[in-house]
Image: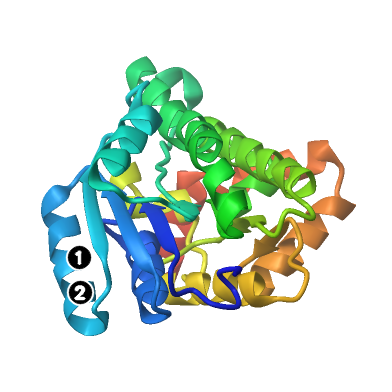
Amino acid sequence: MSFARDPRGHTVIVTGASSGIGVAFARAIANRGAGLVLVARRRERLVELAAELRAAHGTAVTVVALDLSTADAATSLQHELAAAGVTATALVNNAGFGTFGRFIDEEPGRLAQEIAVDIVAPVQLSRAFLPSIIEAQGFLVNVASMAAYTPTPRMAVYGAAKSFVLSFTEALWAETRGTGATVFALSPGATSTEFNAVVGTDDATAGAAMRTAEQVVATALSHLDARDPGPSVIDGRANRFSTLAARVLSRRAIVALMHRVTDPARRASERAATA
């Protein structure tokens, strides 16, 4: 039975489950009656969330504290779940982070971690768990970003990583057609999470109006429930409109526009004018 028809009996892995969109996914999925595997680095937060979900919904929750930037993260998660007798039938690859600033100023080790978490981990986790997802007619959601749709100066690696996630996931959507599994990419825009705090500046979202994590998850679950879900979904009407505008502009024009949008000096000037 597919997850959309009957979530009970399914067990969903949610990465990045210690905050933001990951927490919202966990709460919404638990509310539907599915079991959960919560994955993130911060065990204390996962334990607290697991207790909340068990108390509110009687949900079966497995907590796995794991650093997804390590090379063997997917294998480690497979082994831990096998040892616990847990079979995952769905996966939300939500974990990710960005860096902000000129590429040549970024610390190489931090960039390597960013690539590991934002690209390598979703690929390896998808490969590890997609067979059981297909067998159970579950789902795979890879969280991309609005940054996937345009080059993003000052967030060059993050934007490229999310573009990879979008392309990769849409290809998997085609490969899994007819299997009973649902695969798609979710692209949020600016969302009220810890993203900017991790990046280190509010300039990372360029002053855009914030959506809530709950709104983003509602968009994802509505897409999951659709009769024939497409390969990707964008959260928010304004965000969907902006991707249409990006298709009209030349590559030169769009990257020049994004360079201006992400310019901290422009935002500082706007704040000063407002003050």
What is the total number of numbered labels drawn onto the structure image? 2
Is 30 placed above or below 179 here? Answer: below
Q: At 64% from the left edge and 76% from the top edge, which residue is drawn?
A: 225
Q: Which residue is disc 1 drawn over?
A: 50
Q: Is 65 on the left-hand or right-hand side of 100?
A: left
Q: Is 109 on the left-hand or right-hand side of 234?
A: left
Q: At 14% from the left edge and 70% from the top edge, which residue is drawn?
A: 51
Q: At 19% from the left edge and 57% from the top edge, which residue is drawn?
A: 46
Residue 202, quarter of the rendered image: bottom left
> Which amino acid type is marked by label 1?
Ala
Nearest the camera: 246 or 146?
Answer: 146
Colour mode of the rendering? rainbow
Residue 258 x, y percent position in the rendering: 65, 45
Residue 181, quarter of the rendered image: bottom right
Nearest the camera: 147 or 79?
Answer: 79
Q: At 46% from the left edge and 70% from the top edge, which residue is drawn?
A: 210
Residue 7 x, y percent position in the rendering: 49, 74
Is 36 placed above or below 108 here? Answer: below
Residue 191 x, y percent position in the rendering: 45, 65
Alpha carbon separation for disc pair 1 and 2: 6 Å
**Dot 1: few (<14), some (14–19), or many (≥20) neighbours within 10 Å?**
many
Residue 62 x, y percent position in the rendering: 24, 55
> Which amino acid type is marked by label 2?
Arg
Residue 99, quarter of the rendered image: top left
Q: Image quadrant for the C terminus?
A: bottom left
Q: Image quadrant for the N terminus?
A: bottom right
Nearest the camera: 241 or 20?
Answer: 20
Q: Which residue is disc 2 drawn over?
A: 54
